[in-house]
Image (tube, rainbow, N blue to C red):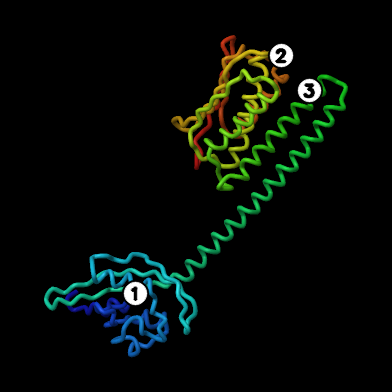
Amino acid sequence: MHDVNPLDIVETIREGVLVLDADLTVRFANRSFCDTFAVAPEHTVGRKLYEIGKGQWDIPKLRTSLETIISGRKTIEAFEVENFFPSIGRRIMAFNARKLYQPDNKIQQILLAIEDVTERVRLEREHAAAHERIGMLLQELTHRVKNSLQFIASMVRLEARSNNSVEAKAALERVSHRITALGQLYSKLSKADSVEAVDAATYLDELCGDLIASVHKEGSTSIVLKKDIESVLLPTDRAIPIGLIVNELVTNAVKYGFPGEAKGTVMVTLKRVLGGLRLTVADDGQGLDPRRADSGLGRRLVDGFALQLGGQVERKSDSRGTTVHLILPSHEGS
């Protein structure tokens, strides 16, 4: 290795490399620098960096950073600068620089490596723009789905009002309520920061708030809804069925656990457990009567959504209240 000229090694590096004096005079420029930025070695070495070419290297941010290297022990790491070069057009460069010190002659110099990252940054920007565009399209689609669901719910409510059968009217009202709940879930997802996932603490907290507000609107002001929801990222394809399960369980708890003017509490909990998540909806009401609880449809819906999520449902109901656990397997992002 002692017989190898270090300059020969530097000439094989793909990045542009400059050696600068303390006053930013260029003492060495490798072949890659000259080729990339279309400059001749004889018009580069011996000149100040900011004098190269037609002054295109007179970049204030770069010049200031290089001067601070000489005055202290600072280094430059992946410092990106965008600049226009008359001969090659606009380029984005990543700079890495550090001070070189030779004790024998007390010379201080700067080793400057320059990587042309124009293409990489262009691709990153295009990807970000495409991602933003997809997000906007998905939000628009979600908004349209929500509006369509609201329209369908309104049609079902009109049909319920015009139906003379008490049972049919009640069934249609329940269908309308579920469609409205689904529309509300889409509305909440459309407001999320990400179209790919939603924070459970925000998402379910707002959902539960809407549910209890609906209960109070119907006159059951004695029902208290408590929440203990951990901040967990839920992929949107899991957030919707989880939201529908919470809607179904809380609605059933209020309707069937506390008939009349009974007072009580409904508790919604979401916690991380070994291997996944545990969602719990519990109340201290009188317990569910299978003959009254929506003819078993609510139970079947919860079981169906749980199956879709790959989860398991555990129920316990007696005169001291009802508790429903949903055990969800671990999932990427949750």
Of the numbered discs 3 and 1, the one sitting upstream in the chain is 1
Residue 168 percent across, percent down from the top left: 82, 23
Residue 97 percent across, percent down from the top left: 30, 70
Q: Is residue 74 left or right of residue 245?
A: left
From the viewer's perspective, is the residue at label 3 or at label 1 nearer? 1
Residue name at image x 23 percent, y 70 percent: 71
Badge 1 marks a residue whose secondary structure is helix
Q: CA distance from mark 3 to mark 2?
A: 15 Å
Q: Is residue 214 left or right of residue 41?
A: right
**Figure disc tally:** 3
| Residue 324 quadrant | top right
**In this figure, which residue is indicated by the disc labeled 1?**
63
Task: Give the vertical position of 296 relative to 113 (above or below).
Answer: above
Crowd class of label 2 (few under 14; some 14 to 19; many from 20; radius 10 Å):
few
Q: CA distance from mark 1 to mark 2?
A: 81 Å
Residue 296 percent across, percent down from the top left: 70, 20
Name the residue type under label 2: Arg
**In this figure, which residue is indicated by the disc labeled 2?**
291
Task: Give the vertical position of 234 relative to 139 (above or below).
Answer: above
